[in-house]
Each structure stands twice: as structure tokens, then as C-alpha cells.
Image (cartoon, rainbow, N blue to C red):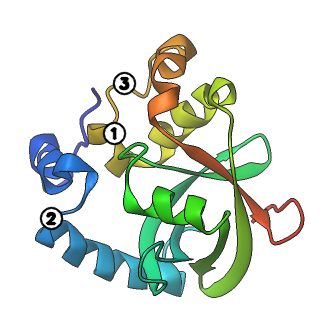
Amino acid sequence: MAKLGSWPLSENAIRAMYAGGRGNAAARRFARVWAAVHGAGLLPRRWVTLEVAGRRSGRLARFPLGMADWRGNWYLVSMLGENCNWVRNVRAADGLVTIRHGRSRACRLVEVPVDERAPILKRYLATVPGARPHVPVDRHAPLAEFAAIAAQYPAFRVEAAGEKSDY
């Protein structure tokens, strides 16, 4: 697994923050800060805040995420796998979300079939270093290794509401 370089927390500490696929108190504090920073558009455009209705509460939930660009499209990938909250909320909302990066954009997230995820997962790990401790494949591994885990890591293509988007 690739090292995070100068990242201030160890890979084990980062994984522990998301034990069981859900963020602990520290992870939730970091997420609130990063959601505000990403939503304000202070970082490159791949860093966004996803807003989606909670599947049980109906209240707006915000998640700071990094996107992967691949073949002219933008993708959101779940570094925590199938059962993380944002994935479950997006599925319950039929993919209708808002993505914030300086301004709000109504979008639809379209789930990518498992057999098409490998190159997207590889690109995601290349561009979103915080995800690397959570995915058991090195970012430099061949596509076959990404294909072997693709069913465990949902990926969603970002489309403008009603049409294809360049985000």
C-alpha cells in the first residue's frame, strides 16, 4: 500500500478513524471542516462537498469527497465501500444530489457497473491520496488487481441533472 508521504497521521490512524465504515468523532470533526472548505471552492475542483437527503431523517447530509476524472467524466468513489452513509443516501435518493464547489450544482450520480470500475478506481487512488489507506490495492498496481476489488467499492459518474456533465 502506498505511503501518504508527509501526511500528519499514520495510515493505521486514518483507517481507525473509519472503523466499521463509519467515521468516529474525530473523523466527523474533520469532515465538517473539509465540507466547508471544499464547498467554498478553496481547493482544486476535484475536491467537493456532496449534499444529499438522509435516507432515514430526510435532512440534508454533507460529505467532503474527492473526485476522479476519467475519459472526460467526473466520478465519486466510496473509499469505505458499499455500506458508507453517502452511498446509501445517494441510492435512496435515486442519485439526485447537489455538489458544491464554490457554487451549488444539481446533479445525478449514476452508478458505474462493476466491470467498468477498475480504471476509475485506479485513477481515484492516483488523485485522492486520503483514500489510499482504505483501499487494499496499491495505486500503481495493474488494472487486474483493481478489477478484483471493484465490486466492493461503488463508483458513480457525475452528471448534471438531466444530462451528461463535464462538472
Residue 24 in sight: yes
Where does the image place residue 155, in percent across and percent down from the top left? 58, 44
Instruction: Give the spatial CA distance, label 3 vs label 2.
Output: 25 Å
Q: Which residue is mark 3?
A: 138
Where does the image place residue 49, in percent across and percent down from the top left? 50, 74
Q: Viewer-proximal residue, 162 or 125?
A: 162
Residue 106 vs 17, above or below: the answer is below
Classify mark 2: helix, strand or loop: loop
Q: Residues within 10 Å of mark 1 (few under 14, many from 20)?
A: many
Q: Which residue is mark 1?
A: 132
Q: Which mark is residue 57?
A: none
**Amino acid type at image mark 3:** Asp
Instruction: Give the spatial CA distance, label 1 vs label 2.
Output: 18 Å
Where does the image place residue 16, in percent across and percent down from the top left? 12, 49
Q: Viewer-proximal residue, 7 or 146?
A: 146
Mark nearer the N terminus (1 vs 3): 1
In this view, which residue lies farthest toward the front?
56
Q: Residues within 10 Å of mark 2 (few under 14, many from 20)?
A: few
Looking at the image, residue 110 sits to the left or right of residue 56; the answer is right
State yes or no: discs 3 and 2 in contact (Cβ < 8 Å). no
Mark nearer the N terminus (3 vs 2): 2
Q: Residue at x 81, y 72 (%)?
A: 161
Q: Nearer the viewer, mark 3 or mark 2?
A: 2
Classify mark 1: helix, strand or loop: helix
Instruction: Give the spatial CA distance, label 1 vs label 3.
Output: 8 Å
Residue 37 in sight: no
Classify mark 3: helix, strand or loop: loop
**Amino acid type at image mark 2:** Asn
Q: Which residue is mark 2?
A: 24
Looking at the image, residue 34 sits to the left or right of residue 122; the answer is left
**Amino acid type at image mark 1:** Arg
